[in-house]
């Protein structure tokens, strides 16, 4: 669904699985260490979920970043993204076409291995190494708080916590 609640794309699980694994091979080709952080601007777009799961397969930690330009405008949003990229110690970053200009500007001067759009990542060669998905004691993702009282803080969510939450939801 898009930001207005309209159905904008359908992504069957089988296609998501295939695309996430293929993308994970491309991410693995970047030579990042296990547990490296990948900042993902959390746009309501199928590419966000594709990248989120690709990180899981590649042994990387996805870090969703806000996809909203607040009342402060472009500069405030870019500054916020810049601070979050530093705070989460991002090694690589992705944003869809709509948000990439902001992410690109926010990443200036930072030592990122790669910063691009989904199309740029899709052009990377696939590595021919076995995928190494994250395990139950490892981080699943880093989630930032809303920051209503101060700057947002990263909360480290483990794979085990995600599965426990899922089990509770299914009860």
Image: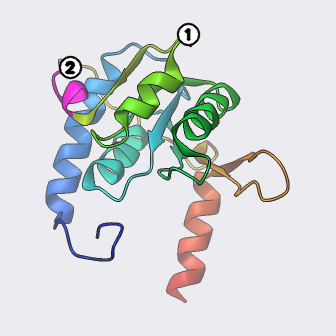
Residue located 49% across and 15% down the image: 112
**140 is higher (above) or lower (below) than 106:** below
Disc on res. 124: 2
Label 2, secondary structure: give it: loop
Residue bounds of the magenta highlight: 119-123
Between 120 and 142, the residue placed more toward the observer is 120
Between 124 and 140, the residue placed more toward the observer is 124
Which quadrant, please, contains the N terminus? bottom left
Q: Position of residue 89 (x, y in %)?
A: 64, 25
Image side of residue 64 versus residue 29, left or right: right
**139 is higher (above) or lower (below) than 106:** below
Q: Position of residue 129 (x, y in %)?
A: 27, 20
Please state the total of marks drawn on the protein image: 2
Q: Position of residue 97 (x, y in %)?
A: 27, 39
Label 1, secondary structure: give it: loop
Q: Position of residue 134 (x, y in %)?
A: 49, 41
Which residue is under mark 1?
A: 109
């Amino acid at each position: 669904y898009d930001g207005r609640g309209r159905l904008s794309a359908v992504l069957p699980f089988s296609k998501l699985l295939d695309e996430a694994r293929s993308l994970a091979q491309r991410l693995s080709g970047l030579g990042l260490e296990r547990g490296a952080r990948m900042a993902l601007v959390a746009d309501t777009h199928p590419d966000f979920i594709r990248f989120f799961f690709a990180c899981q397969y590649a042994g990387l930690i996805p870090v969703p970043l806000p996809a909203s330009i607040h009342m402060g405008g472009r500069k405030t949003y870019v500054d916020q993204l810049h601070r979050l990229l530093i705070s989460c110690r991002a090694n690589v970053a992705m944003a869809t076409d709509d948000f990439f200009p902001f992410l690109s500007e926010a990443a200036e001067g930072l030592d990122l291995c790669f910063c691009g759009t989904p199309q740029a990542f899709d052009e990377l060669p696939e590595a021919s190494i076995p995928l190494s998905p994250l395990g139950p004691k490892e981080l699943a993702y880093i989630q930032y708080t809303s920051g209503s009282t101060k700057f947002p803080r990263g909360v480290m969510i483990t794979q085990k916590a995600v599965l426990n939450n899922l089990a509770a939801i299914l009860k």
